[in-house]
Amino acid sequence: MLSALPIAGGSAACGVAAMAWAVRGRASSVFGPSAWRGPRERRALALTFDDGPSESTPRILEILARHGVPATFFPCGANVERLPAIARAAAEAGHEFGNHGYSHPLCCFRLPRFIEADMARAQQVILEHTGARPVWFRAPYGVRWFGMRRAQQRLGLRGVMWSAMGYDWKLGAEAIVERTAGRAQNGAILCLHDGRELRREPEIGNTIEAVRRLVPLLLERGYKLETVSQLLCPTT
Ligand SMILES: [Zn+2]
């Protein structure tokens, strides 16, 4: 596997940099097939939410419903088990579900069997509570590791990262909108969070306010908001 890394030269520093890119780089497919943006030909982009569901997810669902736009949720399996009715409501509203692991583990240095078990448990919980079988996998913390390629294959998942991260767990609403709207372009995959890892009742007020401003702004600019599957695998 390591021989596939694009290591130019033989210095240790270069090897470390290449490894860091392989693990965290949004365009890296070293640990399994992965996409990070859609085609540039269509004026469409995808809004994605990680780490939910949380007690505040319904407020995001309301905003999306008001504008009639779909999103893709990458929940933590443990949160789906904790708040199954909210997860089900999102699925019934037509939003897509991806896999973001069960316990939101940091996978580097973990054994492949741990990684696959966590991904498989998330897949099972999401299917059981929402009826949706995820086809996309977003690695927790964006960290890919040995074993993910095989786990993705076995579970029928393909990796997906993002083209713009909202940093909404630490920025104010205005800064989140500025970051994400500033990086909106054809094929963009924008990443926000409707939860905060496995925390109960997380404070996501800035995310909600950002979504309230961002969605109409993107629509005004002529973007069609699509699920990740619609964006990456258009059928029309
Ligand atoms: Zn996450």
Image (cartoon, rainbow, N blue to C red):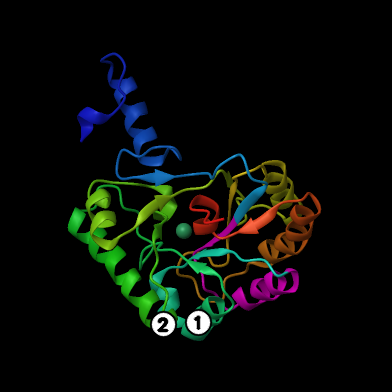
Q: Is residue 46 above or below residue 71?
A: above
* Count of marks overlaid on the render: 2
Q: Is residue 114 magenta?
A: no
Name the outermost residue toward the right. 220
Name the quarter where the N terminus is drawn.
top left
Q: Bounds of the magenta span?
A: 47-67
Label number found at residue 129: 2
What secondary structure is found at the residue carrying circle 1?
helix
| Residue 50: x %, y % from top left | 51, 61
| Residue 182: x %, y % from top left | 72, 42
Instruction: Name the residue nearer the viewer: 34 or 147.
Output: 34
Tell me the residue that label 1 is attached to: 88
Q: Are marks 1 and 2 in contact (CB under 8 Å)?
A: yes
Which kind of residue does numbered mark 2 sit on? His
Residue at (69% x, 51% y) in the render: 176
| Residue 221: x %, y % from top left | 79, 49
Q: Is residue 64 magenta?
A: yes
Which kind of residue does numbered mark 1 sit on? Arg
Name the quarter where the C terminus is drawn.
bottom right
Q: Earlier in the sequence, mark 1 or mark 2?
A: 1
Residue at (52% x, 56% y) in the render: 235
Residue at (34% x, 45% y) in the render: 33
Q: Is residue 61 above or below residue 192?
A: below
